[in-house]
Amino acid sequence: MLAKVDALGIDASDQLASIGQAVITTDLDGVVIAWNPAAEVLYGWTESEALGRNIATLTVPEVAQEVAADIMAALRDGVPWSGGFPVRRKDGSRFPALVTDSGIYRDGTLVAIIGVSTNLGLALRPLLERSTDAALVLRSDAVVSYASPAVHQLFGWNDDALIGNSFLPLIHPDDRTSLGRFLQNVLVEPGAHPPLELRLKQVNGWVWAEAALTNLLDDPVVRGVVANLRLSARRSTAEEAQLRIEELETALESRLIIEQAKGYLAGREGITPEAAFERLRQYARHRHLAIRDVSRSVLDGEQLPPAALTGRGVLGANRHRSDHPHR
């Protein structure tokens, strides 16, 4: 193969110029010493602008600086790295990249670091964006490297706040331990796993959702754990049923209090229960109070204002004429 390449007069620079992925080489301090045309297209910096500058200042957003430093330290120790990583363009915009970094050795000595990167979003979009489920790609440490558009539609999460940050703060504190155990099992067993129910943060509070995790860490395109998220229909139905039960219980309790107050007021004032209810209702309306609260006050033995107990007061306005035959 090499003989054919040499015969055609193709050298390494020709190959790097033709490859469709960004290929960047740095020295051991992270200073760029090679920057191919695809890197210009992907990151927006020309070769002349990039050469001699530190890669961290060109492509690494603030949120990922610490992780990038850890990766660079591991590479200096001879440990290659591959996975999803948030990167930054020249114009400041961010996107998820699939990055593979490894060392270049000469006579057994590490002399440089080469990195190949591509837009992870473009690679995953045909796979994940047709689904109505929200989809995240997580690194093994639960940091988000990609988020599908449905994530914002279902949960209101913003891409800039997700990419490069941990997924854990979006999970209800009471559910983080169970997710942690679940994620540990997923990491040791490739492939799809049964969904887990947990509460996720939404604009107006917490909602129950199903999280189905698939370990694709060995997949050359994904290099991560895909989390498909959907609102839990079972939990939503159960919560709606519980809410209806609570509303019914509250209505029955209110009705019981009102009926008791009617009987108490009717006995005390010598009027019919219907007239007692009308007086409670009129008094509540006149004072802008809930009739339940007025009824509870009557049952608690509280004295209503005198105006409510006189013939011209609200509660006295409906006293039967038979009680006062000379009026």
Image (cartoon, grey):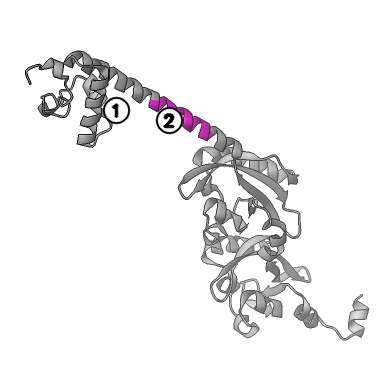
Q: Residue at x 26, y 18 (%)?
A: 273
Q: Nearer the viewer, residue 177 or 289?
A: 289
Marks 2 and 1, how far apart in space?
15 Å
- Residue of label 1: 292
Q: Secondary structure at mark 1?
A: helix
Q: Give the quadrant of residue 238.
A: top right
Quarter of the image with the N terminus is: bottom right
Image coordinates for residue 127, horizontal then vertical, percent: 72, 57
Image coordinates for residue 272, horizontal then vertical, percent: 24, 16
Q: Residue at x 26, y 16 (%)?
A: 263
Quarter of the image with the C terminus is: top left
Note whether 156 is above or below 282 in the view shown: below
Left or right of residue 204: residue 29: right
Image coordinates for residue 110, horizontal then vertical, percent: 72, 69
**Residue bounds of the magenta highlight:** 239-251
Q: Nearer the viewer, residue 233 or 54?
A: 233
Residue type beneath disc 1: Arg
Note whether 319 is above or below 113 in the view shown: above
Image coordinates for residue 269, horizontal then vertical, percent: 17, 16
Q: Residues within 10 Å of mark 2 (few under 14, many from 20)?
A: few
- Residue of label 2: 247
Left or right of residue 131: residue 206: left
Q: Residue at x 15, y 24 (%)?
A: 316
Residue sitting farthest toward the front: 326
Residue type beneath disc 2: Glu
Residue 232 sits inside the magenta stretch = no
Q: Give the quadrant of residue 249.
A: top left
Q: Give the quadrant of residue 31.
A: bottom right
Cβ atoms at labels 2 and 1 below 8 Å apart: no
Q: Which mark is residue 110?
A: none
Q: Main secondary structure of the magenta part?
A: helix
Residue 246 sits inside the magenta stretch = yes
